[in-house]
Amino acid sequence: MSAACVGLLGALSAPLDAAPEGPCGALSAEIAGGFSRAWPETGVNERFVLPRAQVQAALGQGPVGLRAGLAAVRSGGEGGYIGVAGEAIVPEVQIAEARWAPHPQVAVGAGLLEDPWRAAAQAAWGLPAVAAPMVERAGLSPVSDLGMGAVLSSPGGRVEGGLHLSSGEGARLRERNDGQDVAALLQVSPLGEERLSIELYGRDGSTGLGSVRDHRAGGRVAFTAAPVTAYGEVERAWGLGGDALAEPIAASAGGVVALKQGPQAWGRLDWLRARPADPESDRYEFFLGGGYAQGPALVGLSYSGQRNDPAASLIAGAEALASAHQLTLFLSAELGAPPRPSEAP
Amino acid sequence: MLALLLALVACAPVDPLAARRAWVQDQLVTDNRLFLSRDPQRVAEKLDRMAADPYDYLRGSNRLWLADRANAFHERPPTAFLSVDAARATLLVGDAHPENASTYLVAGWPDMALPIEMIDLDAAGVGPYTLDLGRAALGLALLGEGLPDCAWEGCQDAAVSALAEGYAETVLGDPDEARRVGGGIFGRLRDEAEEEGPARQRLTELTVSTSEGLRLRTDTGLDAAHAGLLPLDRDEEAQARALFAALDLPAGSRLTDAARRFGVGISSLPALRYLLLVDQGSPTDEDDSLIEVRELIEPPAMPGAPAQPFDDNAERVAFAAAALWSEPMVAPGYRALCLDGLYWRALPVSSFVLGLDHLKIAEDVEAGEVELADVERLGGELGQLLAQSHLRAGMVTGGDLRPVLIADLEAGGGEDGLRAELLGDAEAESATLLVDWGLLNDLIEEEGPLLGADGLSGVL
């Protein structure tokens, strides 16, 4: 594995540094497994879980790079019976990108590209083993989608702008209409060295056979001062999941205190208002936890809770669905990935 | 520039009817995606049948109904129930519309009357008990919609009110009181099954006598309604034989003929379906019987349901039949199984197994043989039947469900509260369903028989 290629393991961005002349390769993997207990007590409350299992590989030569990523998914979904070989866990191709950086401030990519807004959300939160970023959990952004993208950055890298075209259906569905999604992401790092990042995002999209609108607008501020990272974000959708009349607004704020060797702690609050005009349609999710890290391994205990207003429940008004809680003991390890800015020695 | 464009696009008004049309299209296509990949012609036939009759549209759109109930992005009337957590862990029929009610043969017949139960358990699973009631109420409203002089007020609402009363009285009333459904429309159904069953009418219709004994009456092609029995090709024959072997029938049973069966059902119309003719060893035809083996598809997700406790799809259906029905079915061949990665449900095809038919009820009302008061009675007996099934199954986590349902019903306003909620939901949902039915017809006319999903066939 060559360190020169590690940068290819991240989302599409302008490289800035000189690209390696010869061929290079990089491999990263992140796996988290654990045991989970859920409340209230109905049905199956205790289970072993695999919240994260992902492998990525990258190859580079000069200005050209390739990146592929596989993730473990439960075939048939978590609630289905019809899957592969029963309901076996199977690898899903989530990323298959070709990149070309014709200039240190320019990169273009094509293929199955990581969604830039979701990738930025994951980088800001930093603990996918505990929970996927809010934009993914709420169905606001897919993990990846077929498309093309271009990223330009200013000299020094303090401003970066990306334009992405994609199918709008996400990696799991083929294109269903003639309309392509257009998304733009602007990232500004006024303090340099990724200490403060301000991100703005917009997407003009459509989904499904009926070309249902699927627009987004969002903003995020992320701050890093080792060993602390914190972020806050807000997003508005016009159309979601094939429902053109859905217009939820969502926000998330969280932070992690992470020493490379030693204790870690995290907290996060997600909020989603299903109908902007109805204050009784709020859903809150919170994640609290702590653990102990040794190098790339982390043993942690995570609590997650959910509180639904009457109009936000899956069955409106059902008090039994107003709250849910879960406690998860997990072990995660990540090897080969570029170091996070928050990781202090 | 993009921000400005986005702001303009985002603020553009959305036509609610166009949005609904796209939602219906998306939900129906997604619901049939598995079948679209394999046999799009059968999907087109299913959608065509749904478009021809609002009640058949109801039968084919259970997932859409559930998706609407779970859609928090729209204003929905809040339930007064489901305050007790265990109430959402009830074993449900899953698609409890009136046509799901059927007679079947039991060991005690003819000393005891044929039971009537909700026989199609394709969508069975654990979830909030109010979902079965909501589906039954909507089904009663749609049933009334197709009857002469059965408007919402005075007819459909009376049937839905009776459903609430039948359910609440069975749960809240004396547990030792014997309650047996079987008057009015259900009584006529039972009488017909008890008359036709011994005469083996279905067997006679579907078979022909040859020098080698009974054989299936296969067709050379499907009829105008795309229905019929077609001979098997080599792969199908191998699958039919493997399914027969997996049925684990009594020793001496022999598969004498098999065919693909088409054009049956609504929701499961595109599913693989075999008709097996089985001889149980006697040299005469007296013990020959028909078994339909049909592919079981994924049940819809029940909103608000806890984790499903079943090992697989076959166990889900078999467990539901054992737990929800008052008596086990005795005809040979009833079981659910897994073969070659597919799940199957085997059910005897017999005149003892006779389900309600909304078109026949309409004919009987037209002919004056059934009165509109009988529809109200049907609602009450359906409520009673659902309550008995839920109580019989008990809590999935073990224990008596009755105290849970009593507590939840009383917290939600008891019988009056249940009646008010079911009436409100059924009136609104039946109006929505009729609009959706019209949209499906528009979609077929404008987008084609597959609603524009032609390009999705072939590969998942």
Image (cartoon, rainbow, N blue to C red):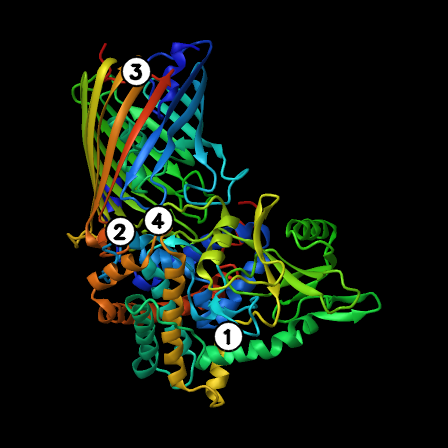
Q: Amino acid at mark 1?
A: Asp
Query: Quick one: SS at disc 3?
Result: loop
Q: Residue at the spot x=32%, y=48% of the render?
A: A240
Q: Amino acid at mark 2?
A: Asp
Q: Amino acid at mark 4?
A: Gly
Crowdedness near tag 4: few (<14), some (14–19) or many (≥20) residues, C-alpha within 10 Å = some
Query: Quick one: SS at disc 4?
Result: loop
Mark 1 or mark 2: whose residue is earlier in sequence: 2
Nearer to us: label 2 or label 3: 2
Mark 4 or mark 3: whose residue is earlier in sequence: 4
Q: CA distance from mark 1 to mark 2?
A: 36 Å
Side of A232 where B68 appears, left or right: right
Chain letter for mark 4, please.
A
**Residue occupied by mark 3:** A339
Nearer to us: label 1 or label 4: 1
- Return the x and y of residue A179 as percentages of the image width and height: 40, 47
Query: Quick one: SS at disc 2?
Result: helix
Side of B398 where A174 appears, left or right: right
- Say above or below: B369 vs A125: below
Nearer to us: label 1 or label 3: 1
- B260 vs A200, nearest the viewer: B260
Displayed quadrant of residue A69: top left
